Image (cartoon, rainbow, N blue to C red):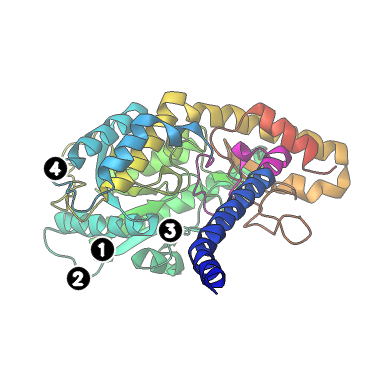
Amino acid sequence: MKFFISLFIYTVLLLPVAFAGAKKQCRIILNDAQKKEQLQKDIDLPDRFEALRDWGSKFFSDSDPMWREPEYLARIQEYAVPNITNYGGKASVLVNQYHTYMNNFFKGEVKHFTSNGTDANNMLFLYAKANLAERLRKEPTAMKVLTFTDIYGGSYGPILNLAHGKEQQIDAPFFKTGEKLDAVKLNALKKKEAAALKFIEAQISDLKNQVGAIFMEPIPASEGVKIFRTEFLLKLRVLADKYETPIYADEILSGGGRTGKFWGFLHYEGFVPDLVSFGKGLALSGIFEPEREFHTGRRRASLGYGPMATTMVNPLALVQALQVLKTIWNRRLDLNAAVTGAYLMERTREALNKKGSAKSDNHENLSGIGLLITGFPFYTLSPYDSQRKLRPGYNERILPVLTTTKEDIDWVIDHHLGW
């Protein structure tokens, strides 16, 4: 009887330990299996080419060494606590460093941080209203913001209404990158530019229209990557300054280096907008004011508060965004995007030409600048469907990480197009 009692006691005491050991062992086996699966994925597809096409939310692969730098990890731990204020507190150091790195690419000032790109674009409406009030010398009873056709802008708030407000949209005189403009096409484009400028001047010259700003995307990427002629934007700049109407540039997708320059507007020599919204791959959204010469009498609209306001930025998010910004600058990944993007376009066109007329439609749709490319032919990259084929993407747009190399591109063309 004592034997059975002792056996029962030992069983009760040791069984949980045995199960715990087995559970731990199971976890180890599971982790090894996951590592093996991930290793195979890395062999199948180098994750540094990872092409998140829809929203451009990544500039770097999850396995990039930047995320394991000791200084960065120490800062993450330091700021990952509640109640770290950034108004005159510890995070002010981060804000100053962020400004410094931003100014490495183009002189200016971060006016505000926001939680996402839509909020940044909506904040531009506050600036437009302040600008209009200064121009009218009184509070406006209504306000109109002019915009070019085919914009997105955001998913809620005034910016969403702007995208649907046909009466205030300018017929955009842009063309696809890589498109050859012969004499006929160029002449038609110039007429379209003249009509756009005429429409804009008619709107902003009459104060009764209460136009607060002109909103634009320097490099739109919907249904093809498109650009303006530099000559047109320089005329637009002169016209806007003449009537003290600011130009706001949405660089939420094109900002950060993906186009081969840190800001998309830098592709137009001499053109500088008044305010620029940024976000997505930069890991933090906000509004940047590039430095530019103002004509006599020009006044800057102000909202009375800036990026140090306590509600404007989370210090932990700022640590992450600063790491992204520093890495782009230290590795000059904007320049890398220019070189590798051009190489990707070249190799893709070569592959399409070899394939022949069956792919002619894709050949016509292919357009891009830097690593911002649309019309890329179907390929089998992550995420896979049940047949291990890529699910249909948004506009066939690819946005490879900024660290993509020519070797990565060769691998994708040779192994994943399946031609």
Cα distance in 3D space between marks 4 and 1: 40 Å
Residue drawn at (56%, 46%), measured in percent from left and top? 226
Indicate left or right for 38 with 66 as reference. right
Q: Which residue is mark 3?
A: 153
**Of helix, strand and loop, which one carries label 2?**
loop
Residue segment shown in magenta: 39-62
Instruction: Indicate the position of residue 290 as horizontal and vertical percent values.
Output: 30, 37
Cα distance in 3D space between marks 3 and 2: 24 Å
Disc 2 and disc 1 in contact, CB within 8 angstroms:
yes
Instruction: Indicate the position of residue 292 as horizontal and vertical percent values.
Output: 27, 34
Q: Which residue is mark 2?
A: 141
Cα distance in 3D space between marks 1 and 3: 21 Å
Instruction: Indicate the position of residue 98 as horizontal and vertical percent values.
Output: 29, 35
Q: Can residue 291 be spotted in the picture? A: no
Q: Earlier in the sequence, mark 3 or mark 2?
A: 2
Residue drawn at (37%, 56%), measured in percent from left and top? 116
The circle drawn on residue 89 is: 4
